[in-house]
Structures are given as C-alpha cells and as structure tokens.
Image: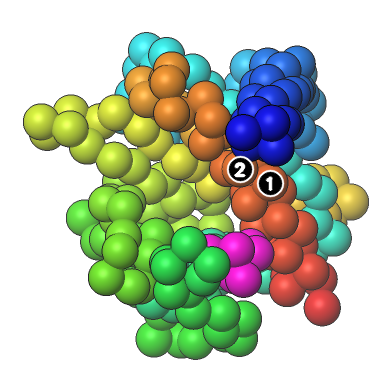
C-alpha cells in the first residue's frame, strides 16, 4: 500500500509540474519564432474565424524562395508526405502516418473543399477541410461545427528582400479549456518540428 501511495504521489507531482510548465510556457509557445508585427498582421484566411477564443502564431525563416516551399505545404497530410513531425510518436498512439518527404506532382492539386487527413489509420481525428488555396502565398485548413468554422490553421509565405521567406503558421480556435490545454504543449512540439522539417526540405 505504501509503494502504491508513493507511485500515485509521484504521478500527481509530475502532472502538477506539467500543468505549471504548460501555463508558464504557453505565451512563449503561442508566439514561437514570430515577430510582433507578424502577430498583428492581417493574413489570408483570417476571415474564416473572425473572433477566435485563442490565436497562436509561429514562424521560421527559410533560405529559399516561396516557390521552393509552397509544394511541401500542399503535400501535408497523413496519406501524403505526413505531417513533417515526429512520425514515431504519431504511430505510437495508433495514428499511422506516411513519411514520404519527396516531391510528388500528383499531390500538387489542392482545392478548397478537399480534405487533409491527420491520421491514415482507423483511429483518426476529423480531417481538416481546405478552406482556401492561394498559390505561393497561403493555404488555410479548418475544422467546422454545425457548418461554422471553429478552428483555422493557416500557412502563410512572406518573401523577404534577401531572397529568403518567412513561413508563418497561425492557428485560430474556439476549442479551449479542459483537454485542449493539455494537448496544447504537444501540438507546439509537433508543429515546431514540422516547421523545421519544411525548412530543411526547402533549403536542400
């Protein structure tokens, strides 16, 4: 009984530590890599969810023109290139994920209304719906509830004068509180890895 209580105490301590870290680190995670100007700038796709409960902006500088980056965004999806993140972690929870990080012309035709799958296995969260596609500028994915947008996930390409490109992701959502706060740090870790992988693929 004593050992059981010790284990329970350790687990509760770890849980409390995780919650505290998540609360303290959330502002940093929600703006990772982005600049103050980028966080207030209006981007394509902002109009789908005009008054979200929470918005996160993340960014990375890629030493490549937009034309080298845009194709990798079109190939996002569990049945295509995957999510450019930690595939082993996705597979660990039963979410089978492709990892084909090569260019496929047949995956370059993305249109509004198409689905972007988050998981290729039987266990799968609802796929994202393609909201808007602006070639070499932006792609917006989203989730709907009762025909209203409850979350959007934007990928914006901002060309720079030195030939590099800023890739910004903006997530606007009404899904907050409860389990969503626990998921948020995991989403940050996965999305950060995604941005870093897209950078490598675009610059190579």
Residue 186, label in figure = 2
Q: Nearer the viewer, residue 151 or 178?
A: 178
Work out which residue is located at the far front of the displayed protein and give it.
1
Q: Position of residue 73 (x, y in %)?
A: 53, 62
Q: Residues within 10 Å of mark 1 (few under 14, many from 20)?
A: few
Provide the secondary structure element on which disc 2 rests. helix
What residue range appears in magenta?
Answer: 85-90
The residue that disc 1 covers is 189
Q: Position of residue 109 (x, y in %)?
A: 35, 74
Provide the secondary structure element on which disc 1 rests. helix
Quadrant assignment for the C terminus: bottom right
Q: Which residue is drawn at the image coordinates 36% and 32% (left, top)?
A: 151
- Asked whether, in this view, residue 148 is left or right of residue 121, the answer is left
Q: Position of residue 203 (x, y in %)?
A: 81, 71
Note whether residue 67 is visible. no
- Asked whether, in this view, residue 185 is left or right of residue 143, the answer is right
**Relative height, residue 145 to residue 109 (above, below):** above
Q: Which residue is drawn at the image coordinates 72% and 17% (left, top)?
A: 20
Residues tagged 1 and 2 counted as in contact (Cβ below 8 A):
yes
**Relative height, residue 27 to residue 195 (above, below):** above
* Count of marks overlaid on the render: 2
Residue 54 falls within the magenta-colored stretch: no
**Relative height, residue 60 to residue 82 (above, below):** above
């Amino acid at each position: 009984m004593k050992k059981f209580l010790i284990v329970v105490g350790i687990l509760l301590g770890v849980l409390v530590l995780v919650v505290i870290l998540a609360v303290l680190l959330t502002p940093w995670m929600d703006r990772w890599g982005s600049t103050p100007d980028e966080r207030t700038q209006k981007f394509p796709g902002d109009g789908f969810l005009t008054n979200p409960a929470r918005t996160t902006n993340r960014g990375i500088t890629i030493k490549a023109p937009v034309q080298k980056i845009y194709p990798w965004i079109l190939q996002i999806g569990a049945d295509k290139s995957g999510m450019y993140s930690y595939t082993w972690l996705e597979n660990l929870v039963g979410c089978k994920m492709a990892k084909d990080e090569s260019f496929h012309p047949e995956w370059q035709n993305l249109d509004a209304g198409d689905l972007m799958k988050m998981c290729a296995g039987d266990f799968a969260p609802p796929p994202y719906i393609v909201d808007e596609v602006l070639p070499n500028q932006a792609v917006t994915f989203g989730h709907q509830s009762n025909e209203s947008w409850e979350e959007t996930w934007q990928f914006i390409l901002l060309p720079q004068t030195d030939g590099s490109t800023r890739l910004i992701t903006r997530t606007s959502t009404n899904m907050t509180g409860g389990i969503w706060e626990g998921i948020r740090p995991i989403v940050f870790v996965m999305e950060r890895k995604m941005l870093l992988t897209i950078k490598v693929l675009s610059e190579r």
